[in-house]
Image (cartoon, grey):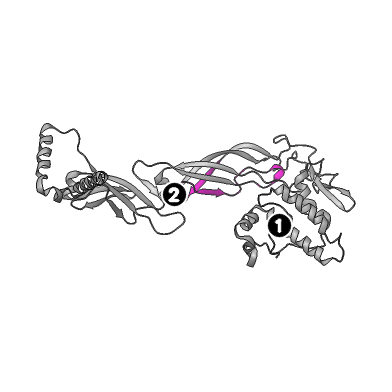
Amino acid sequence: MSKRDFYEVLGVSRDASERDIKKAYKRLAMKYHPDKNPGDESATDKFKEVKLAYEILTDAQKRAAYDQYGHAAFEQGGMGGGGGFGGGNADFSDIFGDVFGDIFGGGGRRGGQARAQRGADLRYNMELTLEEAVRGVNKEIDVPTYVSCDPCSGSGAKPGTSPQTCGTCHGQGQVQMRQGFFAVQQACPTCHGRGKIIKDPCDSCHGQGRVQKTKTLSVKIPAGVDTGDRIRLTGEGEAGEYGAPAGDLYVQVHVRDHHIFTRDGNNLYCEVPVSFTMAALGGEVEVPTLDGRVSLKVPTETQTGRMFRMRGKGVQSVRGGGLGDLICKLVVETPVNLSSKQKELLREFEESLGGSAAKKHKPKSEGFFDGVKKFFDDLTS
């Protein structure tokens, strides 16, 4: 494989459009083609180099790999770029067929054979509850789309008849315009590139080979899916015209917000409110999981915001791996709607925490205010 930069070989910038690349390739291929340079090995080598650069840079996947990794992306069979290129004895119609087919409407046909266009892919947005996403579920969906016409079996011709081979292009879907050694391919103006002509169209689909219909599909959602995951249903997209294969249906998953749990990867998070009495003295509190309730032991002198991990109570990812965990954040709840007696008791309790023993009972509070005092002292010193 040539080690020269492919963009340099074609003389285009790295942000060149596909059309600019094709123009550069056409010009250089005409210049170096072996038929114009008989016996010139250097011209043959340059032609192969130009052709290789063209085939890499006009393939979106290969171009992206080349832009990221350079020639290393195609070494040792990395992208299959090292094989199938070259061939100095190709006819000019083979070389320029794809280039001018795209420019003049012939569209991606190799070897001059007409090919019906595959149906379009479809997208369906599916909203799931957290429980459905974690456990998996079967859902029925209604999809408005094009389906193959039953009366004509997708051919577009009235039942009992069939499409006829185009007399202009003889079924090739393309015609050639020649000027000396130079040939340009374009879509056949009679059959519009299909290679077939329907003289007696089907009454149901009016010759299109497909009709609009809403079809009901059963979709199996695997356990562990999350927002952003996509499920592909092969062949469930739009039917192609004139019996061409159908596209695919992509089910895009979105998981609704849950009133208790928040999901992050395989882990679940929730807040558990506890009274300040339990936080101070300790105890047990029931916490929810997707499998039911479990008991969580609260140690004495627990501060608000402390996290507790319950292993294996999270989510099993659809991509495999171990179960995630449930992370519980304890939030100390301040009592409200207190009676006069309760307020008085709290004041007495607060007074009991004061004096010389305050730091012992409220280490965070005392440490914070000591830090604030030092901060202002430093500002004024």
x then y, percent, for residue 283: 18, 50
CA gap between label 1 and label 2 equals 52 Å
> Which x, y percent locates residue 21?
72, 51
Q: Quadrant of residue 83?
A: bottom right
Q: Quadrant of the N terminus?
A: bottom right
* Residue type, numbered disc 2: Gly
Mark 1 — residue?
A: 8
Q: Residue at x 39, y 48 (%)?
A: 263
Residue at image mark 2:
136
Residue shown at the point (66%, 37%) measured from the top left: 211
Residue 264 on image: x %, y %: 40, 50
Q: Quadrant of residue 35?
A: bottom right
Q: Nearer the viewer, residue 37 or 109?
A: 37
230 falls in the magenta region: yes
Q: Describe the element under mark 2 as helix, strand or loop.
A: loop
Asked if the magenta segment contains residue 381, the reply would be: no
Q: Earlier in the sequence, mark 1 or mark 2?
A: 1
Discs 1, 2 touching: Cβ within 8 Å: no
- The span picked out in magenta is 216-245
